[in-house]
Amino acid sequence: MNQPSHSPVDLEQFSVEEKIAGRQMAFWASAWERFRKNKIAMIALRFLFFLVVVGVFADLIAYDKPLICRRNGTLEFPIVGDYLID
């Protein structure tokens, strides 16, 4: 049986920093650039950002009182009073 001959691996070609487009980049910069090139990953990141924004403002989005009302001829903002008191 003939076994394929293995040539020694040049370990100098592997380094902690990657060469991308002819320049050396740090690990996180390289990871971010590779992530940005992936369209599905960027769509997922935007969707995740959207969910975080909705989560932060969920109380305002699903508020059960009026945001602005006119009572006795004056404009009132019940939402502001509720958040300043609590």
Image (cartoon, rainbow, N blue to C red):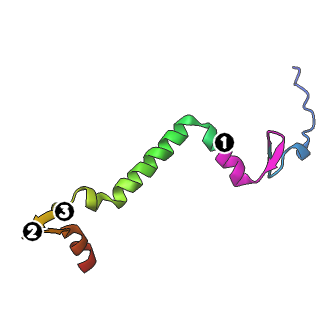
Classify 10 Å Cα crowding around label 1: few (below 14), some (14-19), many (20 and above).
Answer: few
Residue furthest top as drawn: 1
Classify 10 Å Cα crowding around label 3: few (below 14), some (14-19), many (20 and above).
Answer: few
Q: Position of residue 28 (x, y in %)?
A: 69, 54
Residue furthest left as drawn: 72
Q: Position of residue 80 (x, y in %)?
A: 25, 71
Q: In which quarter of the image is residue 81?
A: bottom left
Q: Position of residue 11 (x, y in %)?
A: 89, 45
User: N-terminal of the two: label 3 or label 2?
Assistant: 3
Amino acid type of the residue that numbered disc 2 sits on in the rendered structure: Gly
Label 3 – label 2 distance at C-alpha: 13 Å
Secondary-structure class at tag 2 = loop
**Residue name at image x 54 percent, y 40 percent:** 41
Amino acid type of the residue that numbered disc 1 sits on in the rendered structure: Arg
**Residue name at image x 14 percent, y 63 percent:** 69
The numbered mark at residue 73 is 2
Which residues are drawn in magenta? 20-33
**Residue name at image x 26 percent, y 73 percent:** 83
